[in-house]
Amino acid sequence: MALESGQEIIRSRLGKLLGWVRLVVICLTFFIDIGSMGMCTIALPTIQKDLGFTQETLQWVLTAYSLTSESGVAAACTIPSAQALVAQIFTDPKRQALALSGWGASGSLGFVLGPIIGGLFSSLVNWRWIFWFTLIVEGTLLVLSVFLFRQPKSESRNTSSLAEIVRRLDPWGTVSSIAGLILLVFSLTSGNQYGWSSATTLAPLIIAVVLLVVFVVVEIKVSTFPLVPRSLQSSNTLQLSCAMAALTYGVWQGANYVLTLELQDLGFSSLQTAIRFLPLGGTALLVNMIVPHLLQPVGTRLLLVIAWILALAGVLLLVFIDKKSDYWRFCFPGMILYIAGVGTVYFVSMVMAIVSMPKEHHGSVAGVYNMVLNIGGAVLGTAVMTVIIDSVEANHGGEKSHAAHMDGYHAALYTTVGFSGLGVLIAVVMYFLLSRKKEDGSDKEEPGERVDIDTKAEPQSSSDCTDADP
């Protein structure tokens, strides 16, 4: 009896240890998922000089990351899967909440350390080591995952045929959306190089519009398993939350992209620039800890209005950067304000999207939300910024003129001001529209205000949790 009891204790402790090891692998996966974008962004000027990239070509380094994520290979797939795995591994509510908090913090840590790692590699070794480092870490995590996350023998395996699996992946919707987005970004970024009336620009633009229309028709009318489930397509709250998501990543990725180029153009090295991005990561960590506790007392709708006003004030300060010494006057406070704003919008709009839907749709909502985030980052955040910078530079002295560069950066940052202003407008409309519905009794259970305490404090299931890193 004593021997059996000892064996049970050992098995229990080994099981707990294995659970924490699995959590480390899940957290490292999220860390590298978020951090790789920061590593890549901070090295862009070095990559441009080394390979002789034009501004139009350079933005594809980031766009490739974003559109790959949009297809489900990265964040849109990783986040819901990670949440589900954590919920399965840690069934005790307190440990589950602790594990999910650690998982969310790993994304914040990736956001903080990603630019630092990228700056170290590009300044001290070679920018190519950013990609080697990512490959080594992800390869190691892949091997570990094969052994650590095996399907239990007691669970029935999916015996669907290959044709059925392909059908469930919605090939028509997937291909038309990805091809349409890639051609749209190409046409937008090639207009200044080849001319807006040239066939090289117009042909991809027309094909992109056709493909995106096909995608909408397929999702609404044709596909049996649409990428965006039909039960979600009619939700006004989800639609507005996704609009917020696109604007959030448009402002975040756009401002980061422009600031990376601008600070290094002002004379900072890659590593010095990365260090000056630390306020973004530190503020994101604070947002991750504070905002969940404000959902109940303040309310989601009012939080969105306040958050977009903060983002608007922050990016407006960034417009006034003209020289190195402006970092502490304008860049530092601007970074803190705008990341506090978009970080709050990211978390709150995600919560609104999730709690407005039944629990069985939470995984789909998370996937749709993250897909829209990456589309916003690729199109609004990178492609549009590139078009604006190139257009202004061409009309103010060309790429060799420092003054033309600064004019281009300022124009791009003014665009993020416009995006933030649009965010304020949408948030105000949501505030008064949902308030009126609540007063009229036309919306008996207000999705924008119905925030389960477990969603913000102690998540009870994978679908009740989101990460709060922009």
Image (cartoon, grey):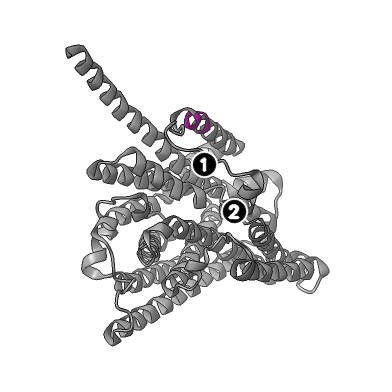
Q: Which residue is mark 2?
A: 168
The image shows residue 7, relative to residue 194, as above or below, that is above
Specify the amino acid type for callout 1.
Answer: Gly
Placement of the C terminus among the 4 image quadrants: bottom left
Q: Report how far apart the C-alphas of labels 2 and 1 lie in the structure.
A: 38 Å
**In this rendering, does residue 272 appear at all?**
no
Q: Nearer the viewer, residue 352 or 460?
A: 460
Q: Position of residue 449 (x, y in %)?
A: 29, 71
Q: Which residue is mark 1?
A: 118
Outermost bottom residue: 440
| Discs 2/1, front | 2
Q: Nearer the viewer, residue 250 or 219?
A: 219
Residue 420 lies left or right of residue 397; in this view the side is left
Q: Quadrant of residue 155?
A: top left
| Magenta-tinted stretch | 142-146
Residue 411 lies left or right of residue 433; in this view the side is right
Q: Is residue 145 magenta?
A: yes
Asked which secondary structure carries label 1, the reply is: helix
Q: Is residue 77 magenta?
A: no
Specify the amino acid type for callout 2.
Answer: Arg
